[in-house]
Image: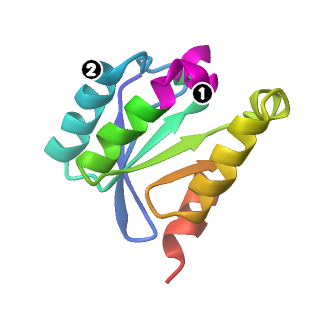
Amino acid sequence: MTDTIETLAGTPVLVRPPDGAPVRDERDATDLIGEGWYRGAEWVLLPAACLSEDFFRLRTRLAGDIVQKFVNYRMGLAVVGDISHHVEASDSLRDFVRESNRGTQLWFLPDAEALRARLARP
């Protein structure tokens, strides 16, 4: 399947399907951001299944590198799906997810409907 553009709560979102191309490194993140910009997206909905296990191991710095790309290009990133097994295994990741969800740039959410609800908030 290919990435699609959906409007969630009035916001254009590039949606990667769960069986879409993986985001393994900064270059993949930059390509995804570029596609989003080209297609007019303000946010990217990225299934957790498209991220490598290293993303969820903060000591690899992969999450920080990928998230920094989204911050630099001012595009929101929503990681969607069940990451509970990763969070349960790491206090650092649990803190990272909690702090990210308090912000406006990176959210970890269970599904697209949760993203729609979050984007609808004033």
Q: Is residue 17 left or right of residue 102?
A: left
Numbered mark located on residue 6 in the image: none
Q: Is residue 16 left or right of residue 89?
A: left
Q: How is the image coloured?
A: rainbow
Q: Earlier in the sequence, mark 1 or mark 2?
A: 2
Q: Residue at x 71, y 47 (%)?
A: 95
Q: Residue at x 19, y 46 (%)?
A: 37
Q: Is residue 22 above or below residue 9?
A: above
Question: Which residues are the magenta region?
Answer: 51-63
Q: Which corner quadrant of the image does residue 10 belong to?
A: bottom left
Q: Rounded to the nearest whole Å, what is the CA distance between mark 1 and mark 2?
A: 18 Å
Q: What residue did someone put label 2 on?
A: 27
Numbered mark located on residue 58 in the image: 1
Q: Is residue 110 visible?
A: no
Whether label 1 touches label 2, CB < 8 Å: no
Give the residue type at disc 2: Arg
Instruction: Check disc 2 and report its element: helix, strand or loop.
Output: helix
Q: Residue at x 30, y 56 (%)?
A: 42
Q: Is residue 70 left or right of residue 86?
A: left
Give the residue type at disc 1: Leu
Q: Position of residue 117 (x, y in %)?
A: 59, 68
Q: Position of residue 43 (x, y in %)?
A: 37, 52
Q: Residue furthest bottom?
A: 122
Q: Residue furthest right?
A: 88
Q: Is residue 99 above or below residue 39?
A: below
Q: Magenta span has 54?
A: yes
Q: Position of residue 97 (x, y in %)?
A: 65, 47
Q: Position of residue 61 (x, y in %)?
A: 49, 25
